[in-house]
Image (tube, rainbow, N blue to C red):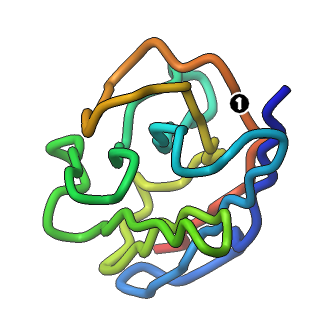
Amino acid sequence: QVQLVESGGGLVQAGGSLRLSCAASGRTFSTLAMGWFRQAPGKEREFVAAISLSGGRTLYADSVKGRFTISRDNAKNTMYLQMNSLKPEDTAVYYCTARIDWYERVFESGYDYWGQGTQVTVSS
């Protein structure tokens, strides 16, 4: 069973930056395609970014493209989301996700494992 634990959320002013981390355990990290989702109050959960097994491929939602950067360190079993130029509409609970894979692919859906989430609040 894969366990995912997010950290790094908090309160930041608009225009600021945060870096989220996701620590994975329970399976060889390099066999997990990873992603980030978020859910704002009263809204459905939405895709934010995804990264392939080695980090060679990434995918972003249009709303965060150019501001957020997803990365991973397979030696540390950790994935990151660097968030710059934050906006109030980025306020949400951010979730780390994973799915087992064998190829260098990115996914917007179909994840099997989810973390508990970390709150990000951007004040105007």
Q: Tag count in the figure? A: 1
For residue 84, say whether it is visible. Answer: yes
Q: Residue furthest top?
A: 110
Q: Residue at x 44, y 55 (%)?
A: 90
Relative placement, left or right, of 16 versus 40 is left
In the rendered image, which quarter is residue 41 located in? Answer: top right
**Viewer-proximal residue among 79 and 66:** 79
Q: Residues within 10 Å of mark 1 (few under 14, many from 20)?
A: many
**Viewer-proximal residue among 38 and 110:** 110
Image coords of residue 26 (percent x, y):
84, 40
Determine whether the residue tagged by mark 1 lies in a helix, strand or loop. Answer: strand
Image coords of residue 1 (percent x, y):
85, 26
Image coords of residue 50 (percent x, y):
35, 43
Q: Residue at x 38, y 72 (%)?
A: 86
Relative placement, left or right, of 92 versus 7 is left
In the rendered image, which quarter is residue 82 located in? Answer: bottom left
For residue 49, say whether it is visible. Answer: no
Q: Residue at x 54, y 25 (%)?
A: 100
Residue named by callout 1: 114
User: What kind of residue is marked 1?
Assistant: Trp
- Above or below, 15 against 9 in this view is below
**Viewer-proximal residue among 15 and 109:** 109
